[in-house]
Amino acid sequence: MRRSKSGIRSMAMGLAASILIFAALFTQTAYAAEDRAATGIFAYVPFGEGRSVNIALTDIDGKSYLFLPSGITAQSVVFHYDSSDTEYVFSDGKVLESDRNVDITPYLSKDTGDGSRILNLTCRKNATESSFDVYVMQSAKIPAVYVESADREHGREFVETSKSNHGSGRLTMLSSAGKAVYDGELTQIKARGNTTFEADKKAYQIKLQTAADLIQSGVAANSSKTWILLANAYDPTLIHNTTAYRMAAEFGIDAPDCRSVDLYYDGVYRGNYLLCEKIQTGSGRVDITDLEKLNDKTNDGRDLEKADTATGANKYGDIYRYVTGVNNPEDYSGGYLLELDNAYYKAERCYFITSTGVAFTVKSPENCSKEEMIYISEYVESLVQASLNGGIMPDDESSVWDHMDLKALARYFVLQETVANADSFSSSTYFYLDNGGKFTAGPVWDFDDSYGIRADHASIEGFIGGGFIEPFMNLPEFRSEVKAFVSSSKYTKSAAGRTDSYVSEISASQKMDRVLWNGHDHLYMEQATYDEDIAYMKNYAGGRIKWLKGVFASW
């Protein structure tokens, strides 16, 4: 989890001309490849000690595309096919020899306009000939992640059918130079998200057999088994989340570390993804007391997932849901990770609803006892009551800021307003409370619906967040903290973002993604071209910052 200023830690090392692409016959891990346009000719990337990962030709509207990852060049390609009864030849009649290094560059057309170049091949088999075009596209600067399912029955189609369907297999991650970052067992992959699950381009959660620092941060604590692959399906720029996460880190707010990757699932290219840390408790993530582990220990490892749930009401009359029969540890005053989620809270095991109608789910511990739910729901409600009472706590008349991190809340609010996140303080809004600590806003999460791409939030004027945050906006200490931060050089520099750097990093990959998905999942406003989408984002950001500075100057 990032809290300090950091730029892009790009692993881009240029293209490695010596690395080969092999086209190969289907193997056990490439059964799902979409090779309808050119049956029998495939690609795989060799690395390490005899290891390789497959890349199949992908059929898009009757055209056969070969999407190449970073680190591979058209100057050094090796094709493999069954040469016993088949022969492939180039447009000049030269035979494309199986398992031989060949430079296909002379045979590639000029850019067709979408970033692809055409390679024409003729297949000769059983005294017949058939010509076809392969549209070759090349990524650059970013790593590639390869998921290989353990078996056909539990491949991508199975995983994407339901969020309760879990797959397994092997995961390989190669750097932009083709070097292995991770190559080992994948114990679980599942589709994730709420609204995003409805998109054709699915997001995933993955669990590795061995903890690894997939983003190559160089920080030992960042090694983890669980990671998220965000699809950015509703974001035509593909950089809203990257921009917001890195801006948050520069603001000094907890934020997941991330980096862009190309994803190949069972040999098929699936697009540009954002690999990032999961919002969870633990070292290198939200580093607070592991109350979930303490609960498990106190309950002798009993499977609490099988226990029933029930509802109750705290002393304020707020409704909460808890897990029955759970014993608490001696101290349960900290170790809570909460998500403000007004839309999907009923899908969680434990939640509570404040007197103002704001729903919080408890992400950790996932299975809370009745006493724990009473404690955390009353703690949060006391903050709500204080926000409605000039910042004075209801029980002891102390300041709300003795119990809540003012700086974190103010900067979290400023971030949400700067990027105009439509989900601000409505969903995907996290808080945590540790033993002896203050209630703290963060980490940040989910910025697909930002920068004015939704018609109902297209104006650069007006506050986005409401509900929970609204009464805090009237407190003098909060207003002073916001005003001071927004008027600082730190805010001015960080809020501007590094859009051009992020765009440059994924320039080649986004072209492949756009060809593959063609704006299919974009529910909101999308411009005619990617460049126009980026221009819209920049113009919106500039206008939004200007408006916020003007408003906050009077606070």
Image: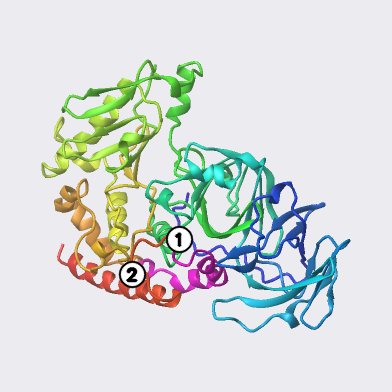
- For label 1, count other residues whose C-alpha is less than 10 Å away and answer few (under 14), some (14-19) or many (20+): many
381 to the left or right of 294: left
Q: Is residue 327 left or right of residue 555?
A: right
Q: Mark 1 is on which residue type?
A: Thr
Given the current orientation, which residue lies at the most extreme left position? 389
Element carrying mark 2: helix
> Where does residue 14 sit, x and y in percent of width and height?
67, 71
**523 horizontally vs 395: left or right:** right
**Residue at position x 34%, y 63% from top?**
524
Earlier sequence position, callout 1 versus callout 2? 1
Instruction: Answer yes or no: is residue 496 visible.
Output: yes
Residue behind mark 2: 492
Residue annotated with mark 1: 242
Location of the C terminus (image quadrant): bottom left
Residue 485: percent from the left, percent from the top?
A: 28, 61
Task: Using a 10 Å C-alpha cutoff, classify the residue at mark 2 as few (fewer than 14 neighbours), some (14 to 19) or many (20 or more).
Answer: some
Residue at 31 percent across and 37 percent down: it is 345
Q: Is residue 295 visible?
A: no
Could you tell me residue 132's position as x and y percent?
A: 69, 73
Q: Main secondary structure of the magenta part?
A: helix
**Mark 1 and mark 2: span between their CA atoms?**
18 Å
Callout 2 amino acid: Thr
Camera-side residue of 399 and 442: 442
Q: Which residues are magenta?
A: 492-520
State which quadrant residue 69 falls in: bottom right
Count of labels in the image: 2
